[in-house]
Amino acid sequence: MPDPQVQMFGLKKSAATRAAERFFKERRVKVHFVDLKERPIAKGELTRFVQKFGLNALLDLEGKAYERSNLAYLRTTEEGIIARIMETPELLRLPLVRGGKVLTVGEDPEGWTRMLEG
């Protein structure tokens, strides 16, 4: 059986991202970490999460970045919001994690456990 590994999109300063990293490290899972400060998430990758969860589920509606962005008041298309997310990753509920066919958004230990069972 190949070594379990996951791909994680997040920000180093995000507490939930750090919690996810710790979760996988404790279980000896290799993490391919993409720091969204250094490299925006690929549009195709983001689309995968949008298709599974819907765009609103990906947004951190409680976060300061969302408040500052005025997205709640802007009339914009899904494309417009996706473009905004790519330049301001803080708008996302981080981390976004992909392990096999399982995707999770935000701090989701149950989802992470499912990834490792796959």
Image (cartoon, grey):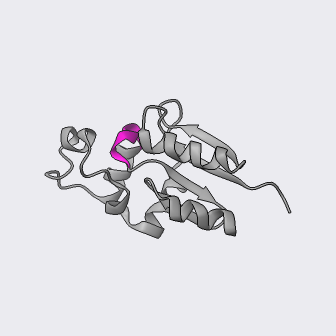
As drawn, the residue found furthest toward the front would be 26
Q: Quadrant of the C terminus?
A: bottom right
Say if the magenta span includes residue 99. Answer: no
**Overall secondary structure of the magenta stretch?**
helix
Q: Horizontally, is 41 left or right of 61 in the view? A: right
As drawn, the residue found furthest toward the left would be 73
> What residue sits 61% from the left and 40% below the top?
33
Q: Horizontally, is 64 left or right of 95 in the view? A: left
Q: Quadrant of the N terminus?
A: bottom right
> What residue sits 46% from the left and 68% below the top?
51
Quadrant of the rendered image containing residue 34: top right
What percent of the width, then of the height, locates residue 35? 53, 35
Looking at the picture, does residue 26 appear above or below residue 12?
Answer: below
- What span is in magenta? 86-92
> What residue sits 36% from the left and 38% below the top?
88
Q: Horizontally, is 42 left or right of 93 in the view? A: right
Q: Nearer the viewer, residue 101 or 111?
A: 111
> What residue sits 65% from the left and 46% below the top?
26
